[in-house]
Amino acid sequence: GINAEYGVYYINKMSFVLPALPFEKNALAPFISAETVEFHYEKHHRGYVVKLNELAKGTPLETKSLQEIVLTEQGKAFNLAGQIWNHTFYWDSLAPHKGDKLSGKLLHDIVASFGSYDEFVNKFTSAATNHFGSGWVWLVRSADGKLEVVETHDAGNPLTQGKQPLLTIDVWEHAYYIDHRNNRGAYIAAWWNLVNWDIVEKRALA
Amino acid sequence: AEYGDLNYLLIMFAPCLKRWINPKKCTRITSAQPYLQIRSLIKPPILPYKYKTGIQPVFSPTIARQHMSHHKRMCKKLNNLMNGTGFENAKIEQILYMFRSTDYDAHVFNTASYVYNHSFMWICLTPNGKKPSDWMKNYIQNYFGSMERFEALWVSACRTIFGSGWCWLVLKNGFPVIIPTPNAGNPLGRLNMHAILTIDLWEHAYMDEYGRDRDRYVRHWLKAVDWDFVEQLIKRVCVSTRVAQHHELNLTRGGYEVDKHSGIDSYNNNPFFNMHAHYLHKTNEQETEDEESDDERDDNPDQKEEEP
């Protein structure tokens, strides 16, 4: 089924709230610097929340959850809500580097869908490196149960395609420009060190 | 190579030989196309200003240099991609035109577009900009009402792009139109479209200095525009596509608000455009009849239009 909603707190008219980071801002260093996390979270993620609250004030959007807006709206509301949802998903998919490897059912599914774990890593990395412009790259479970690597543009989300997201990487330039300038490949290589496989497995079992 | 070796002589005097070998006997572009190519390799444009000190007020020296170094890297990448294909000696515009539609060549198109779009932006800008001449001001007033309105339209067009993209001012059939394009789009290769101005709305252009504040970046960018270049480009496009400068004819009638024949009407009724007039079945009397009925309607705006 579809995952639980992110970043939705019902306060009176349900203003959208920026969820807390699941780690300290410097916890991802040296792979993603504290400066990037600070900028990405405070300026971008918070900025989207503020803008969506402004946009939703006094409109029927207020009564909708983020996921509803992503699935039903288009245009500015979709972009803002999508970005909030995607960023929350992104932060939750990261964890300070532990060095643990993937195991269990998820690994079995990955091998079944991609052939091998390395094959999956290559596919995901090349999709992320070659994606042109802003967007996100996802590991999703499609309706037939198979795992896929999917790219979306700008604020796109695979929920709109009926797929269940398990893992994501942000390939907007703001995610890596401070640390790596134009070198998206270096950012992706560093990002692999930070993937929170525990939570990805939980999502896969849901 | 040591002193006295033949290799040493070659290395020392090779730069002199270049002039003998180079068939064009020059390394600077002399053609009408604005500075986008030297010989057969794609390179960043030779700019009529020093970019290393920055392009005030929009790009600081660090940003300008960084941006230019990315540009050079992409030029190298494009040259490597073109090596071995038939396009080593092609102009960038040709590359863009050929690779714009096929799917597997999207990578080439994106790289070429990156290069072209950035080149075009560099030559549109100049430190602190160049003030528009009277001709240019009249032109903008004629089509946009005023310079302030043009700037407002430009800023709002730039706002419509979410994510990466470019915003262009193009001449479409001789009329200036503001067109925002996502990702790597550019108006090249489309009939009747000639680019005049462009702004880079990718995050790498404004993130360092303006953070998320893209509006402020666009407003600063507007202050750095080289309006003399824009004027020359408009005049050149008008001449090359044999479009008469109808806006000048309109201007003699007294300006924007008076001229009710501006826009698509002037295209049809302008004698310079009516080269095909003898194929139409409209006579001179009919034309004046139409004009008279227009005047009547303007005098009595409440009067209902009579249907023929």
Image (tube, coloured by chain):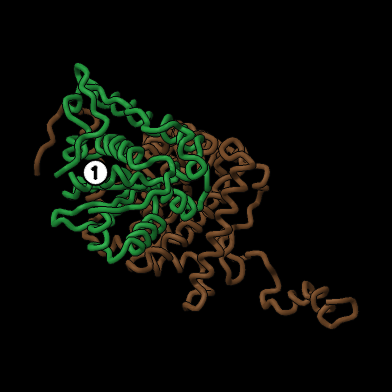
Chain colours: A green, B brown
Of all chains, the one bearing label 1 is A
Q: Which residue is mark 1?
A: A202
Q: Residue at x 57, y 45 (%)?
A: B125
Q: Nearer the viewer, residue B4 or A198?
A: A198
Residue B177 relative to residue B308: left or right: right
Q: Residue at x 34, y 31 (%)?
A: A48
Q: Amino acid at mark 1?
A: Lys
Q: Nearer the viewer, residue A55 or A148?
A: A148
SS label for mark 1: helix
**Residue B126 x/y as whole percent:** 60, 44
Is residue B293 visible to us here?
no
Q: Is residue A175 above or below residue B104?
A: above
Displayed quadrant of residue A20: top left
Q: Is residue A19 above or below residue B247?
A: above
Is residue B94 visible to us here?
yes
Q: Residue at x 37, y 29 (%)?
A: A46
Q: Residue furthest right?
A: B4
| Image quadrant where one finds the C terminus of chain A | top left
